[in-house]
Amino acid sequence: MFEMVLKATIETLYMVGISTAFTILFGLPLGIVLVITSKGHILENASLHTGLSYAVNMTRSLPFIILMIFIIPFTRYLVGTSIGTNAAIVPLVVAAIPFFGRVVESALQEVDGGVIEAAIAMGASPFEIVWRVLIPEALPSLVLGTTITIINLLGYSAMAGAVGGGGIGDLAIRYGFHRFRTDVMLITVIVLIVMVQIIQSSGNLMAQKILKNRRR
């Protein structure tokens, strides 16, 4: 039992870790573009903003289990298979990118407009405004948003077990649900709760540390 739980936990951490990296890589630019192309912002572009918003909303409207099945051909094209931990990463990333994009958008919109106007008055370029004003000012919110995204990915990874994605979800379904092993179900729930608590606490501490250093 210990070996099965350990193996499933490592698989879950692997899926969530890789998915988080790709989600930030693509989701952060998406959120930035959504903000700076909005009405009245530094690179206002109504067509681009509207198109991206619709695309994000359409992707987020699909339940994860349906999205995962829907993109099976795409998953096979990328990784050569539709089952296993590597295959599960693809739908995890596809589902998380629009979610994280909205998180980034919300965090950046909290930045005081006066700070942006001051940067423009000093001759800062759009790139400088993004990387030296928007992101640093919104960093605590971005850290908390990333924490929420990781926890969502953890939940998605558990659902991926329903179609052979591996990890804690796969263990709970194959050995807990199908074999009527209440002890396995209980252990998987406890492991997930512990992981969520560690992730949330770490994110909160990091955000508080950033705020504390900013006040000095």
Image (spheres, rainbow, N blue to C red):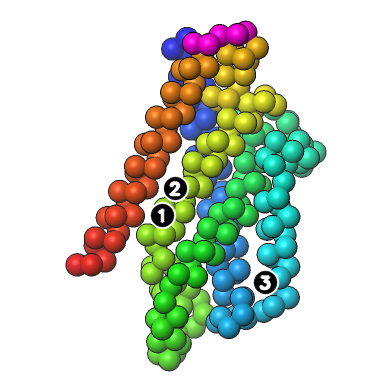
Name the residue located 57 percent from the left edge and 71 percent from the top edge. Answer: 35
Secondary structure state at the residue bearing disc 1: helix
Residue closer to the observer: 150 or 57: 57
> Upstream in the sequence, badge 2 or badge 3?
3
Q: Is residue 59 above or below residue 51?
A: above
Residue at 76% across, 35% down:
69
Instruction: Specify the amino acid type for callout 2.
Output: Thr
Q: Is residue 155 above or below residue 30?
A: above
Circle 1 is placed at which residue position? Answer: 143
Horizontally, is 3 left or right of 61 in the view? left
Q: Position of residue 104 (x, y in %)?
A: 52, 61
Q: Main secondary structure of the magenta part?
A: loop
Under circle 2, the secondary element is: helix
Q: Amino acid at mark 1?
A: Val
Quadrant location of the C terminus? bottom left
Label 2 sits on residue: 147
Instruction: Identify whether 114 is placed above or below 77.
Output: below
The part of the chain drawn in magenta is: 179-183
Task: Tell me, yes or no, whether the two marked residues, 1 and 2, touch with CB atoms within 8 Å.
Answer: yes
Q: Name the residue carrying label 3.
A: 49
Three-letter code, disc 3: His
Tell me the CA gap for discs 2 and 3: 26 Å
Q: Nearer the viewer, residue 151 or 43?
A: 151
Q: Quadrant of residue 33?
A: bottom right
Please provide percent x and percent y for residue 198. 37, 36
Q: Earlier in the sequence, mark 1 or mark 3?
A: 3
The local secondary structure at tag 3 comes to helix
Characterize the local packing of mark 2: few (<14), some (14-19) or many (20 or more) Cα atoms within 10 angstroms.
many
Q: Looking at the image, which residue is at 48% across and 73% down?
A: 130
Name the residue located 39 percent from the left edge and 42 percent from the top edge: 200
